Image (cartoon, coloured by chain):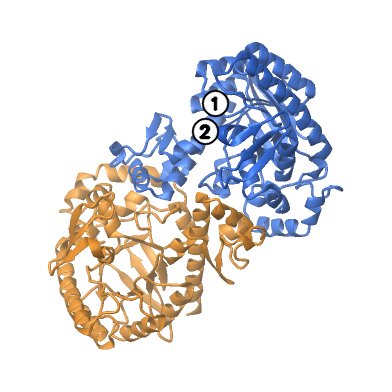
Chain colours: A orange, B blue
Amino acid sequence: MSLRFEISKTGGPARKGKLATPHGEIETPVFMPVGTAATVKGVSQDLLEQLGVQILLGNTYHLYLRPGIDQVRQLGGLHCFMSWPRAILTDSGGFQVFSLSDLRKLTEDGVTFRSHLDGSSHFLSPETAIEAQIGLGADIIMAFDECTEYPAEASRVRDSMEMTLRWAARSKKYFHEHKHEVSWNLDGATAVHARRDKSAVPSNAEHRSAGRVGAPAPTCSQENTQALFGIVQGGMDHALRKESAERTIEIGFDGYAIGGLSVGEPRSLTREIVESTIEHLPKDRPRYLMGVGTPEEIVEYSNLGIDMMDCVLPTRAARHGLLFTSEGKISIKQARYAGDQNPLDPSCSCQVCVRYSRAYLRHLYASNEVLAQVLNTIHNLSYYLDTMRRVRHSI
Amino acid sequence: MSLRFEISKTGGPARKGKLATPHGEIETPVFMPVGTAATVKGVSQDLLEQLGVQILLGNTYHLYLRPGIDQVRQLGGLHCFMSWPRAILTDSGGFQVFSLSDLRKLTEDGVTFRSHLDGSSHFLSPETAIEAQIGLGADIIMAFDECTEYPAEASRVRDSMEMTLRWAARSKKYFHEHKHEVSWNLDGATAVHARRDKSAVPSNAEHRSAGRVGAPAPTCSQENTQALFGIVQGGMDHALRKESAERTIEIGFDGYAIGGLSVGEPRSLTREIVESTIEHLPKDRPRYLMGVGTPEEIVEYSNLGIDMMDCVLPTRAARHGLLFTSEGKISIKQARYAGDQNPLDPSCSCQVCVRYSRAYLRHLYASNEVLAQVLNTIHNLSYYLDTMRRVRHSI
């Protein structure tokens, strides 16, 4: 097993645990900030470390298009490329591709799509998505699935779920045939690309980690391989979710994600589906709920027994001046904050709340200053990570 | 004297010294990063402190328009507003206003101009420019001058210089009648605006400084007032520069700036004018060369006897992907860096060069990621500040 998962405590359905990856241990339940293009927009890796980010999510679709998988692999994989020594999870690219509704064509084999950057044509399938994720070298990678749209006819939901199951099997097959090729497995006998760059990668990594304080260099040994997660689909149908879970577990993965939620359905329905799906997932494997949520939701889902979550909400909302605080949401662009000398959140001890006033943050936002995005993102991420610390503490 | 200036060493015309301001001591010669709208674009105040920034430049024109002088004053002045405990210098707004060539009307009294933001009409004069700068509360403020354009007829240069001298006298007169109104002079008997906010400002400052590591709260006492610098003009005419210097000194200021350079003239001419103007400036007062320069130029001017400089070049160039290194300039957008695993500058120990590769910085820039601007600015500022450290060490 490339991933060790140990539950140390439970509180009702909630679980507190540790997930050991080749790039460090993660305390769960965990929120994973989204670093789409090998960067959490506006926030340096030093700051992410200071904030206590344990694992980042990278988007295969974006990295596949720019700078390209070969480029990242030749530079030693995503960890080395972006100088991030802690854990990374990549999605399969499927979700982004399916979002390009006008630019894609779906067959049993996979998806042909046009780049949103330059219109060039590309193909993603279970095999190429896993190949790309092996090239990127995240600690946890995802099977290629179809995220069923909402609402959808019953037959459409079943067909989509069936295809996701076939794709899950193909994803697993390709992964097991190629997992030794991961770019951080530098001593792997068949790691052609990694070997080609062997002389360059370690020396540069040494150079940089030498000058870095408190950031140990990634430890990659031959024993370590990536972990592959399967994704449960089945729309908003409890029976299909049960079937999808059981058949995905039959294929066998290192962890299980619940996909196809947060796609426009009411929140009460999301909760229902999460709750009923969890019942069919193995207790000893990590459970990852994809693409959620608000601060309230990540607490709620943790309490239902979810171990991992990711969402663009804290970072995207920050860029729009929407800030999460212990006193509720604040839209910092509002004129009422122009003379407000209070910190953004008096209960928050992040570097933004400790140093700056709402008036200053409002000025930065109103003046379209880049520092607005930087500081707002730091605060929102801090708020999410603090929320998860409290959740873990409460279990 | 509100500003203590002590020269500890000289090396030919070059001087190494210390400038004591109400917000800390500055080692000279010093380069002042530009924080136009109360922010060095993309870089947090924590990082500026870590970089060793001793004094920031703020732009009165921009702050006057947004968030407005009254707003900043009511929030305790620029230091409190932006949470910057170290020294600040503000320009008079004149240079920006004169740059709005189509939007301004100049008379003996002052300049009527239209905001570049919303077209609203405003008036800046020696009196209103000083009033604004007292409201902002920088440690060092500048007389309102006219920056003579280049090239210009001899008679035009003289007329412009004469007006700058009359404006210098008016600037000084207004300053001496109103300098006790500075917003950080919290105990000042006539500091109406400061007193009004007294209850709010210190408590918030305390709140924030309490949680801050290594950043002492600004120390403002009744003894401290701002310092006012005069500006020498006179175009590219040595005789007029001499006359402008002598008559500006006669009016009497805490320090002397050389203005009206870096306005399109050849660099050799800039150097000539700087060299000949310095001869006429008092040895015991700080000399500030406005709006320069490249890394080579800031070394050169320091060696001629300049004590203070500012320029948007390091920060603006960074935003355009132009980086200064010990091996020359690098345009990080170039495809040749896409696979380059070397640090940006192997001789630089800034947090960017220690952690990231050129390939990663190139990816961020090519992907239009905000972190590109953040990291590029940190490096360029670090390079400028290191350059000045070396200059001071070499004197």
Residue under numbered circle 1: B298
Q: Is residue A174 above or below residue A281?
A: above
- Residue B271 horizontal side relative to residue B224, left or right: left
In this rendering, does residue A208 appear at all?
A: yes
Q: Is disc 2 placed on a helix, strand or loop?
A: helix
Foreground pick, A284 / B31: B31
Question: On the image, which quarter does residue A114 sit in?
Answer: bottom left
Query: Residue at 83% across / 50% down in the picture?
Result: B187
* Residue drawn at point x = 26 percent, y = 83 percent: A241
| Vertical placement of residue B64 versus A123, above or below | above
Along the polypeptide, which appears first: circle 1 or circle 2?
Answer: 1
**Residue B89 drawn at (x, y percent):** 66, 37
Q: Residue at x 27, y 59 (%)?
A: A61
Please say whether residue A28 is visible from this viewpoint. no
Residue B117's spot in the image, x, y percent?
Answer: 56, 46
Quadrant location of the N terminus of chain A in the rendered image? bottom left
Q: Is residue B390 above or below residue B360?
A: above
Q: Residue A72: percent from the left, percent from the top? A: 27, 50
Q: CA separation, marks 1 and 2? A: 9 Å
- Callout 1 touching callout 2 (CB < 8 Å): yes
- Identify the element where label 1 is drawn: helix
Splitting the image into 4 quarters, where does residue B230 fall? Answer: top right
Q: Amino acid at mark 1?
A: Ile
The residue that mark 2 highlights is B384
